[in-house]
Image (cartoon, rainbow, N blue to C red):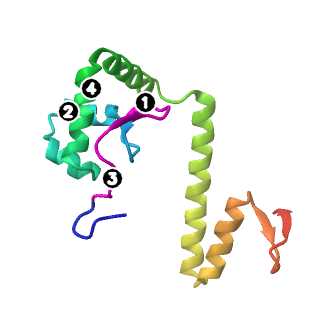
Amino acid sequence: MKSADSDIIDLPPPEIIERGRGPEIKGTRITVYRILDYLLGAWPVSSIAQDQKVTPGHVQAAIDYVREHKIEVLTEYVKILERCERGNPPELQAKLDACAGKARALMERIREARARGASDAEVDEMVAQARNGGARRDANGRDHGRQ
């Protein structure tokens, strides 16, 4: 729940926890590695907090964690950077490219349909068909296979 006078979501007290994706600020999905990115960019704590919609205390907890676990955090951070530098494996990149191509094609069909005056219901049906891999549905919602 957001507080009435800010964009900051009500969070538990500042604490760093481990949920299997690396140390993160409790109540968020913000890892200490994300905070480290800001620190390396020389961002002030208040600006990091504002950008990430947490309190300065939450950012400080992440900073303290980095200081207390410097070697392990930096070792993992370097691994993350190396993995990012390598990019996706070719088979995954091919799937991502195919999905992006399908999304671009759908957006173009929607634009064309809108230009012809298509209703919201018609556009919703186009989106539903795309989600179902091209399956058509009748008025009762029954699947009639791929087109």
Q: Secondary structure at mark 4?
A: helix
> What range is drawn magenta here?
8-23
Q: Secondary structure at mark 2?
A: helix
Q: Which residue is mark 1?
A: 22
> Is residue 146 depicted above or below 40 in this figure?
below
Contact between labelled residues 2 and 3, with CB atoms less than 8 Å apart: no
| Type of the residue with mark 2 | Leu
Neighbour tally class for label 4: few under 14, some 14-19, many 20 plus, Cα within 10 Å: some
Among numbered discs 3 and 4, the one appearing first in the sequence:
3
Which sits in the foreground, 84 or 102?
Answer: 84
Q: Which residue is mark 3?
A: 11
Task: Residue type at mark 3: give it.
Answer: Leu
Label 3 vs 1, first from the N-terminus = 3
Q: Nearer the viewer, mark 4 or mark 2?
A: 4
* Mark 3 vs 2, N-terminal side: 3
Identify the residue under disc 2: 39
Q: Quadrant of residue 40?
A: top left
Q: Which residue is drawn at the image coordinates 13% and 40% (left, top)?
A: 44
The answer for how far apart the CA atoms under marks 1 and 4 are is: 12 Å
Q: In the rendered structure, are the residues bearing label 3 and label 1 in contact, judged by CB atoms less than 8 Å apart? A: no
Name the amino acid, label 4. Val
Coordinates of residue 6 in the picture (x, y in percent):
23, 64
